[in-house]
Amino acid sequence: MTKLVYFAWVRERIGKGEEEISLPAEVIAVGDLLNHLKTLGEEYETALQFPEAIRVAINMEHADHDEPIAGAREIGLFPPMTGG
C-alpha cells in the first residue's frame, strides 16, 4: 500500500485529503502514477487533467515526473505554488 496525500485544489477535486492504495506493477514512475490515478474515476480525471502542472513529492522531497516511486512511503500531489 502507498499513502497518497492531496493538497489544495487537487484535494478539493478528488474529494479527499489522503488515501492508501495498492498500485499495479506497471506503475513505476511519477508519470505512471498520475496516468493510473486518472483511471480511478471522473473526480481523479478532472483533478489530473493537466498532469504536467501537478507537482509531486516522494517522502516529502520534490520529484520529477520520471522519478521512480519504488519504496515510497508517502506521495504528495499538489498544484503549482504561487504567491509572495
Image: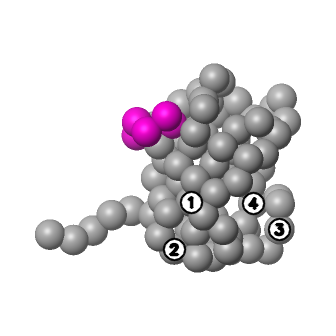
Q: Which residues are magenta?
A: 58-62
Question: In front: 77, or 52?
Answer: 77
Q: Nearer the viewer, mark 1 or mark 3?
A: 1
Mark number displayed over residue 41: 3
Where residue 46 appears, as percent x and y from the top left, is 68, 74
Residue at left offset 40%, top offset 36%: 61
Q: CA distance from mark 4 to mark 3?
A: 7 Å
> At label 3, which amino acid type do we have?
Gly
Q: CA distance from mark 3 to mark 2?
A: 16 Å
Examine the rendered structure and indicate whether residue 5 appears above or below residue 50: above
Q: CA distance from mark 1 to mark 4?
A: 14 Å
Res. 27 visible in picture: yes
Magenta-drawn stretch, dominant element (helix, strand or loop): strand
Examine the rendered structure and indicate whether residue 71 appears above or below residue 62: above
Task: Name the residue tied to disc 1.
Answer: 6
Where residue 32 appears, as percent x and y from the top left, is 70, 41
Q: Nearer the viewer, mark 4 or mark 2?
A: 2
Mark 4 vs 2: CB contact within 8 A: no
Q: CA distance from mark 1 to mark 2?
A: 8 Å
Residue at left offset 46%, top offset 52%: 55
Q: Secondary structure at mark 1?
A: strand
Q: CA distance from mark 4 to mark 2?
A: 15 Å
Task: Name the residue tied to disc 2.
Answer: 9
> At label 1, which amino acid type do we have?
Tyr
Q: Residues within 10 Å of mark 3 (few under 14, many from 20)?
A: few
